[in-house]
Amino acid sequence: MSAVLTINTGSQSVRLTLFNRQKNGEYQRTSMHYRDPNGTLSPDLLLNITARPHIVAHRWVHGGDWLTEPRRFRRQDSVAVERLNSMAPLHNPKAFQWLMVATATWPNARHILIPDTGLYRRLPELTWRLPLPRNICATLGLRRYGFHGLAHTAMWRALRNEAPHQAHGKLITLQLGGGSSVTAWSAGEPLETSMGYSPLSGVMMSSRPGDLDPEVVLKLVEALGIEQTRAILNQQSGLFGVSAESADMRELLASDSASASLAVEMYCHRLVHQVGSYITTLGGLDALVFGGGIGFHSEVIRTKVCRQLAWHGVTIEDERNAGEKLHDGRISPVEAVPAVFAFDADEAFELYNQAIEFKETEL
Ligand SMILES: Nc1ncnc2c1ncn2[C@@H]1O[C@H](COP(=O)(O)OP(=O)(O)O)[C@@H](O)[C@H]1O
Ligand SMILES: CC(=O)OP(=O)(O)O
Ligand SMILES: [Mg+2]
């Protein structure tokens, strides 16, 4: 028997999952989910894990051009890995701290870094290239990297299990958690995604603004300097900035203040705007899939978004959408097109799978 531990350091949570793998390839899993809204949870928690993992798979949110596919971490890589930190300040520095404790705790395990950006190396140039001077982009590594690749892939696989035809059609997946992003797929390949050079762009998020006029960013830098601007854009904007109350969707939905409901409405409005634009890019829509802490758990947010997409024939059934989901995740009527699903996007299994596949090619 061998053990694989997956570590997923999200902006609002840390998820640890231990897979005990038998010789026949079957496994048992144990999951631990911790809330960590300020990124202050101590990685020393790993010391409580009594199992000795053979493989530790680390979700690496920003892989940049250095980490484009799973890669074994070695001590001499530390400088290259740390260099990626500033491009995803809510994620990479935190993942780095957990990596340092994990490598010290299990020095003989294989530590595999798995980029959240990996999926989007498959984007066409039409959508990954930025409309800036080519030479500057090449020198500075400016391009759309795309994020939440593990979660969007997990949603795609879950859909393929339930409705293979739709997974290969015109599809939009919504990962709505601490960070939120939307990916458009065509024929099983990613075509567009809302996050770009960093996980700051695209739709509105818990504490990040999503797309902004670049001049707004220049104004902030001019007035407040680069460090404060980075903190505002990563930690003080989005739902938190607009509501001036909380970055947590549950708290905003429970609040009766006008600023909290405006924040929720803006969040949904921007999602609808993004989905509508992707329906146009795809030339139609076969399926819409919700995932992430908000997307999987909040029937209210799903209802608000789907209601505004009714013009395109998006319908959901209240009983399917409410409470515990049917095991197949479908929340639209059975024959409806577009079909609508909600899945508990299994990033841990995606990490596990990619780590096992990588190990096999490495041998
Ligand atoms: N039942 C629920 N209703 C609305 N929002 C929820 C619910 N459960 C979790 N959430 C929201 O999910 C978000 C966290 O998403 P999650 O995917 O766990 O975070 P992370 O980005 O750290 O991976 C929080 O804003 C939380 O309020
Ligand atoms: C990329 C990203 O924003 O991830 P998360 O939603 O887990 O914070
Ligand atoms: Mg997450």
Image (spheres, rainbow, N blue to C red):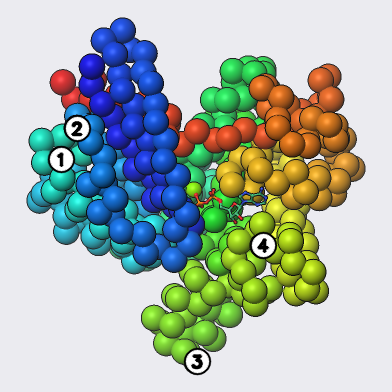
- How crowded pointer 4 is (Cα within 10 Å; few <14, some 14-19, many 20+) is rated as few
State the SS at label 4.
helix
* First of labels 4, 2 by sequence position: 2
CB atoms of marks 2 and 3 within 8 Å: no
Q: In which quarter of the image is residue 41?
A: bottom left
Residue for point 36% across, 18% down:
27
State the SS at label 3.
helix
- Residue linked to disc 4: 251
Q: In this view, does 83 lie to the left or right of 142?
A: left
- Residue linked to disc 3: 223
* First of labels 2, 3 by sequence position: 2
Residue 212 appears in the picture as rendered:
no
Question: In this view, which residue lies farthest toward the right?
Answer: 311
Question: Residues under labels 3 and 1: Cα distance?
Answer: 46 Å
State the SS at label 2.
loop
- Between 81 and 263, which is closer to the camera in this rendering? 263
- How crowded pointer 1 is (Cα within 10 Å; few <14, some 14-19, many 20+) is rated as some
Q: Quadrant of residue 348?
A: top left
The kind of residue on which mark 4 rests is Glu
Residue for point 47% across, 80% down:
229
- Residue linked to disc 1: 106
Quarter placement of the C terminus: top left
- Between 148 and 278, which is closer to the camera in this rendering? 148
Question: Residues under labels 2 and 3: Cα distance?
Answer: 51 Å
- Residue linked to disc 2: 52
* First of labels 1, 2 by sequence position: 2
The kind of residue on which mark 2 rests is Arg
Question: Residues under labels 4 and 2: Cα distance?
Answer: 38 Å
- How crowded pointer 2 is (Cα within 10 Å; few <14, some 14-19, many 20+) is rated as some
Question: Residues under labels 1 and 2: Cα distance?
Answer: 7 Å
* First of labels 3, 4 by sequence position: 3
